[in-house]
Each structure stands twice: as structure tokens, then as C-alpha cells.
Image (cartoon, rainbow, N blue to C red):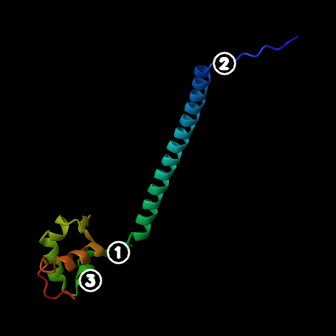
């Protein structure tokens, strides 16, 4: 028995090849999208790790006495500074119960940028 070969016309062959190419392109597109997602996740992880590396250790000052010691001035002057509400408005000093908590890093930054804010001529 003789096998019969079917000869496809040129248009059918081209159509089948284009379908195969389209399948390959779609697979490549999916792969690229997956790689792009993974790259974005890695970049976000790297940014987070960089933020952690750059994070400063926060040092807290407790109470009026601690502020006076940190600034190198008397307790009355330290109390006057707290009463002025400058540190509270800047988010540097907080009242917890009847005790003051002051972020020394932020306080030092504020003093470096604006030494005249506190008008404390006894600041070290």
C-alpha cells in the first residue's frame, strides 16, 4: 500500500509557522514579565536593606535633668526650653506621663541647622 503525502500549500505552511512563532513570543513575554517582577522585588529588598544600614541608632534623653546635661545648661534653662514648645512642635520632645522624652539625634540636628531657635547661650 502506498502512503499518500499531503502537500500543504505555501499559505498553510506560513500560517503554521507564524502560529509557532506567536507561541514562542508569548512564552518569552511571560518569562520577561516574571524576570521583571523578580527584579523589582530584588530592588525593593536592596532599598530596604540600604535603609536599615543607613539607619542611625536613636538615643533618648530622659527628663529635664537629662536635657540640661545634654545641652550643658542648668535645669531651669532646660525647663524653659521645654516650656517654649519648640521641641514639641518639631516632634523632638514628648511627654510620657509626667516625664519628658527627647530624641537627642533630632535635637542635635535641629541645633546644627538652627542654633538660634533655642536661644540658649550655654549650649555646648
| Residue at the disc numbered 2 | 8
Q: Residue at x 38, y 72 (%)?
A: 56
Location of residue 83 (image quadrant):
bottom left
| Front residue of this view, candidates 63 and 6 | 6
Q: How crowded is mark 1: few (under 14 residues within 10 Å), some or many (20 or more)?
A: few
Q: How crowded is mark 2: few (under 14 residues within 10 Å), some or many (20 or more)?
A: few
| Front residue of this view, candidates 83 and 30 | 30
Disc on res. 70: 3
| Residue at the disc numbered 1 | 59
| Residue 112, above or below 44 | below
Mark 2 vs 3: CB contact within 8 A: no
- Image x and y of residue 10, in percent: 61, 22
Disc on res. 78: none
| Front residue of this view, candidates 11 and 122 | 11
* Res 98 seen here: no
Of circles 2 and 1, the one toward us is: 2
Location of residue 100 (image quadrant):
bottom left
Q: Among all residues in the image, which is located at the extreme right?
A: 1
Q: Is residue 57 left or right of residue 106?
A: right
- Quadrant of the frame with the C terminus: bottom left
* Res 43 seen here: yes
Location of residue 101 (image quadrant):
bottom left
SS type, badge 2: loop
Amino acid at each position: 500500500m502506498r502512503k499518500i503525502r499531503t502537500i500543504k500549500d505555501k499559505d498553510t505552511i506560513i500560517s503554521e509557522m507564524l502560529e509557532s512563532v506567536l507561541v514562542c513570543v508569548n512564552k518569552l513575554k511571560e518569562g520577561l514579565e516574571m524576570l521583571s517582577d523578580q527584579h523589582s522585588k530584588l530592588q525593593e529588598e536592596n532599598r530596604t536593606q540600604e535603609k536599615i544600614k543607613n539607619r542611625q541608632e536613636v538615643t533618648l534623653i530622659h527628663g529635664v535633668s537629662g536635657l540640661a546635661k545634654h545641652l550643658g545648661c542648668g535645669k531651669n534653662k532646660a525647663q524653659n526650653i521645654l516650656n517654649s514648645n519648640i521641641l514639641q512642635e518639631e516632634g523632638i520632645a514628648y511627654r510620657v506621663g509626667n516625664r519628658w522624652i527627647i530624641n537627642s539625634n533630632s535635637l542635635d540636628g535641629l541645633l546644627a541647622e538652627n542654633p538660634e531657635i533655642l536661644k540658649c547661650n550655654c549650649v555646648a
